[in-house]
Amino acid sequence: MGLAKRIIPCLDCDKGRVVKGVQFLDIRDAGDPVEVSKRYCDAGADEITFLDITASHEDRGTTVDTVSAIAGQVFIPLTVGGGIRTLEDIRTMLNAGADKVAINTAAVVNPEFVRQAAERFGSQCIVVAVDAKRVSSEGDEPRWEIFTHGGRKPTGLDAIEWVKRMVGYGAGEILLTSMDRDGTKKGFDLALNKAVSSAVRVPIIASGGVGNLEHLAEGVLLGEADAVLAASIFHFQEYTIQEAKTYMAEQGIEVRL
Amino acid sequence: MNKIAIIDYGMGNLHSVAKAMEHVGREAGIETDVQVTADARIIADADRVIFPGVGAIRDCMAEINRLNVGEIVADAMKSKPVLAICVGMQALMQRSEENNGVDCLGFIDGQVRYFGDDLRDERGGRLKVPHMGWNEVQQTQAHPLWKDIPDGSRFYFVHSYYVEAASEAIVTGRSVYGKELVATLAEKNIFATQFHPEKSQTVGLTLLRNFLLWNGSDE
């Protein structure tokens, strides 16, 4: 017995409301991230990831209020991502009650930002989120590249090399999303996950493509992920967190039941 | 009014701890006044003290020394119920092996050690560092802060260094991550946790409630 693999529901929020469709049976206030977070926490979620997809800078104040409200009610780790570009952004989110921040585009634009952030706030709260896409042809040695802007903009950066570099700069955890699988419900890109997980010593959160419970278990057993992140299968109540944990435990994976 | 001083020396997020304490106070029907502070007068006036810490012990000790926190909390460490959390617990020890050795506050006998770059489980599987996530804590001694918490409960950890206590007598909880590590220890009025009770959901909040009700003795 020892450390449990984590299950992390992800809330994509715009202007303080959960988007990407949350469909609980009780839909009275289904789009309220505080309610949703609390529900997942009570159901046994190991952490909550909150991704702010608010486009305009003016609406960011809402996000801070939301994070603060979640942190006042949910006593499990809370990661906040989306629009984290400056040390001041990080401080604001940590002061609002976030435990970790996820840095994505800002790391690509200025890799030194990750080093500064880890030095100032500690590696334990710096998650680097990477969006990777397979760029090798079928049958060739697999190769993945980092993309930004929701998978539209290639960066020329090799995913494995990039993750190693980010860990070297002080990233304490990697949130790894396969842009090929995100939204497909076909399961994680296991080869990508395994390649990244074995390349670095910090924990990897697998993301992108979960459609059923088998996918979650595969992420750990074959993709060597330390945590698995999913949104829609939980939002639409296809499965509960508890069902996911029970299934993973049946597959011999250590979970917090 | 139960006054709680959370010692602020500029390292990391103290709001989680403050919010959790306010929450358990409300739930238990105990009026609390939670202050995040480095003010010696407020600390002297507090009923209990929380000594937190996140990140690297080297950075924490640098700030603790710069702000003279050791002296500011010295009286409280002898007289009030104290809960030290994560790097806060590490800072209470004598010495850390980080960066060829960093002197810590020395309130408790023991060392802080690095997990190592090639940490393995009992089957030889590679273990990631930091030790991040929910691990089981075996209660090795009875203590008032364990009240209503089932033995073997999982708490949330995030750390790359771990404590080795000089005496087994002060160890109250152990976990396993590549090696046996001290999850909690207790000496007189001080209780210290390597994990984050404020992030450990029900069992963590129970521990914080127990701390709020604790008189600082081990009975």
Image (tube, rainbow, N blue to C red):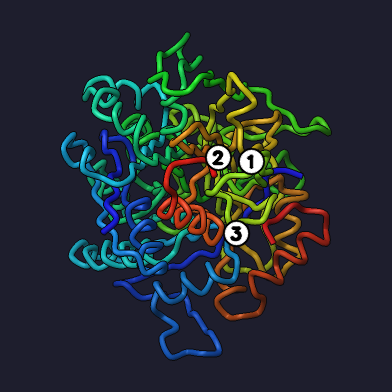
Query: Could you say which quadrant of the image residue B66 lies in?
Result: top left
Give how far across and how far down residue B139 sits, in percent.
66, 43
> Mark 1 belongs to which amino acid?
Arg
In the rendered structure, the residue with mark 2 lies on which chain? A
Check contact, mark 1 vs mark 2: CB within 8 A: yes
Residues indicated by labels 1 and 3 sit on the same polypeptide chain:
no
Element type where label 2 sits in the image: helix
In 3D space, how far apart are the residues under numbered discs 1 and 2 (Cα atoms)? 8 Å
Tell me the crowding category of disc 3: few under 14, some 14 to 19, or many 20 or more residues within 10 angstroms, Cα based: few
Residue lying at 62% horizontally and 59% vertically, measured from the top left: A7
Residue under label 3, please give it: B148
Q: Nearer the viewer, residue A222 or B174?
A: B174
In the rendered structure, the residue with mark 3 lies on which chain? B
Give how far across and how far down residue A16 sits, in percent.
31, 72
Where is the C terminus of chain B found, in terms of image quarters?
Answer: top right
Check contact, mark 3 vs mark 2: CB within 8 A: no
In the rendered structure, the residue with mark 1 lies on which chain? A
In 3D space, how far apart are the residues under numbered discs 1 and 3 (Cα atoms)? 51 Å
